Amino acid sequence: MLDGAAVPPLPGVEATTSTRNPAARDLGTGSGPLVQHPERLKARLKELPAEPGCYLMRDGDDRILYIGKAKVLRQRVRSYFHNSPGHSPRISLMVRQVCDLEFIVTDSEDEALALESNLIKHHQPHFNVLLKDDKKYPYVCITWSESYPRIFITRQRRFSKPHDRFYGPYVDVGQLRRTLAMVKRVFPLRQRPQPLHRDRTCLNFDIGRCPGVCQEKISSDDYQQILRKVAMVFQGRNDELLTLLTGQMERYAERLDFEAAARVRDQLQGLESLSAEQKMSLGDSSISRDVLALAADRRVAAVQLFQMRAGKLVGRLGFTADA
């Protein structure tokens, strides 16, 4: 790792040795597939860290063939280059075309999963056929077309109404279900599907899990205010929501409405325990920028360019030169 970076790294991303490092250049990165050059392959595999992150495989024209994530980059990437009868024909064909490797280290496997999704959707690599089609991945839907909107997980978007909103897609459906379950514990939400209105409220109202939507014990406008806060969770705006709720709690306390302040306090504590937030995305989805990092020692200088598009890290370019 090179020291002396001029700017701090992006959250959750470590500056890694660039694909265009001196060792790779001396061995001739453009001289053909790695499997045909054992010494160059050995040098590239040696650079891989025993940490979580994403890896990118490139062909001789520098096109990205495949993007993957790993809990341990070193083990995962090396497994491709071992002769294994378990390799599918698709993987075997891909490995024979790989001319160079690149990796991005993350803080956790969950962050690697989020980054992998961002990178695949942006670059659409040829061999990532299993992740190209979003319809295989779930979304969170909020039915804003209804007076008392529902929130649920779905894989279908074709039959929605114009005002319904989808958040996603998500590559980890298990994490998505856990996040939604936590949200339903933090916020009082409608639990009952159609038909909405019944003769009496259900148990969810009695235990505070629902605000009594079925008996209209809460107005449509007030209920939609709750849903707008919930939507902020799935937009990645957790920090903004925490600030909003903190202000509400303080105002309730100033008015000596301690019961309402305690409810908001519980919501704050629940949100802080959510593990849904990923460091690989910025809170503001409108932000698109390039982040430049510079580092040098006595032998070599390196430049890393991180590409943020619509609030997400979608790519990284690396360059090196003799100092």
Image: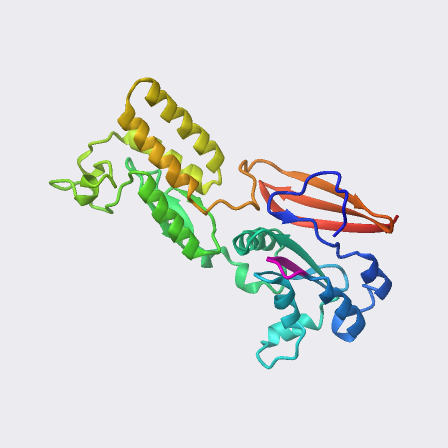
Instruction: Decide which of 18, 246 is in the foreground and name it.
Output: 246
Is residue 276 visible in the rendered image? The answer is yes
Left-right relation of 279 to 249: right
Image spot of residue 250 (x, y percent): 38, 23
Residue sitting at the far bottom: 85
Residue name at image x 55 percent, y 53 percent: 108
Residue name at image x 71 percent, y 59 percent: 63
Identify the colour scheme used: rainbow
Question: Which residues are drawn in magenta?
Answer: 49-56
Residue sitting at the far left: 199
Left-right relation of 29 to 233: right
Left-right relation of 110 to 271: right
Quarter assignment of residue 210: top left
Instruction: Decide which of 136, 211 is in the foreground and name it.
Output: 211
Image spot of residue 111 (x, y percent): 55, 51
Quarter assignment of residue 5: top right
Residue name at image x 72 percent, y 38 percent: 7
Residue sitting at the far top: 255
Callout count: 0
Based on the picture, tell me whether residue 64 belongs to the magenta stretch. no
Residue name at image x 73 percent, y 41 percent: 292
Is residue 158 visible in the rendered image? The answer is no
Quarter assignment of residue 293: top right
Image spot of residue 320 (x, y percent): 82, 51
Image spot of residue 116 (x, y percent): 58, 55
